[in-house]
Amino acid sequence: MDYYDLIIVGGGPAGSTLAWALRDSGKRILIIDKQAFPRDKTCAGWVTPTVFESLGIDAGLYGKNHTLQPIRRFRIGMMGHPAVENDHGDVVSYGIRRYEFDNFLLDRVNADKALDQVVRSIERQGHRWVINDTWETPLLIGAGGHFCPVAKLLGDGPGGHETVVAAKEVEFEMTPQQTADCKARGDTPELWFCRDLKGYAWVFRKGNFLNIGLGREDNHKLSDHLNSFVEEMVANGRIPADLPGRFKGHAYLLYSHAERPLLDDGVMLIGDAAGLAYTQSGEGIRPAVESALLAAQVIRRATDVSAQALQPYGEAIAERFGTRAMHRHDSWQIPHWVRNPLAGTLMRSHWFTRKVVTERWFLHQDIPPLMVAV
């Protein structure tokens, strides 16, 4: 049996950031992921400058060898209505490809890695966790997304009664003809809200790569909503007509709707495994990174791995992201005060779409970067 001070299940931004933040802690760390890296990870994929700052990454240097699409504008509307375009002047976010970004974060981590390894079993033996009858640790970290097997240890886990956002999207490299036919601009992501305000769709161009998708707080007729959106975008020339392949589905929890405990004796959840995606936008990269940094700080200071010793992590999450509202059933993005008949008017307002939708809900410019001393 191979012993580690902590084992992280999931090599995405949350797991790799935690290992990176503990790089000089003296702890022996293992990262397990069911896939080999680099791996396909379909995601709209925008990262604000605050995320690069928290990760200690120079965006300019990263962009020399990786896709990095500067974003200066947003085009926002309600489906079936004209869009409003706002120019923010400076670069307010970047488009990245998760295929590259996740691999970059994991590659810079100096920890043991067991990639392309499915977690088949997790057993509790005394005060230690045993994974696949091969590795053991006193502290197990769930960082494997919504369906992380570690999340099952702390309640219902995947498939429970929590309200789940279901999404479908596709990302592909456009041919020269598709590039010429695509009116969507790289520096201007497009966000289109569903008329019932239970989700939104997007068109996001990153150089020659195009990402199209739609997410809703339930999967009822998700494909119908997506097909209608794609037809509308093709008819308006926003995207090329000959889209390749099929759209891939995934799911995640929004922070205010999630009910998963964040920790227990010898176990912690970070990122999407903990259900930390922003409620108004569904973005999960920044919460994943910040939860990992907060977890690292607690792990460094903890004298043991009891729930009591790890509880400061839960308190730090609540302080950073707010207290979760249990058993809420509102729309996943839009507060009550933005409901019809007001919604249509607000979505045509340059002030509202810029100051509220973009800068607050999607970019979180009112929240300073998390710079945790670890």
Image (cartoon, rainbow, N blue to C red):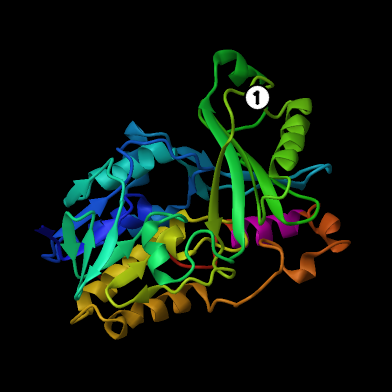
As drawn, 30 above or below 275:
above
Q: Is residue 359 magenta?
A: yes
Residue 200 on image: x %, y %: 69, 49
Point out residue 366 in the picture as x, y percentages from the top left corner: 54, 67
Asked if residue 205 shows in the view, the reply is no
Picture coordinates of residue 101, whole percent (x, y) = 37, 42
Q: Which range is magenta?
A: 350-361
The reply, left or right, for residue 209 in relation to residue 116 is right
Q: Residue 91: say if magenta.
A: no
- Identified by mark 1, the residue type is Cys
Q: Position of residue 291 (x, y in %)?
A: 39, 66
Q: Is residue 65 visible?
A: yes
Report which quarter residue 51 is drawn in: bottom left
The residue carrying mark 1 is 182
Position of the C terminus, as image quadrant, is bottom left
Q: Quadrant of the N terminus?
A: bottom left
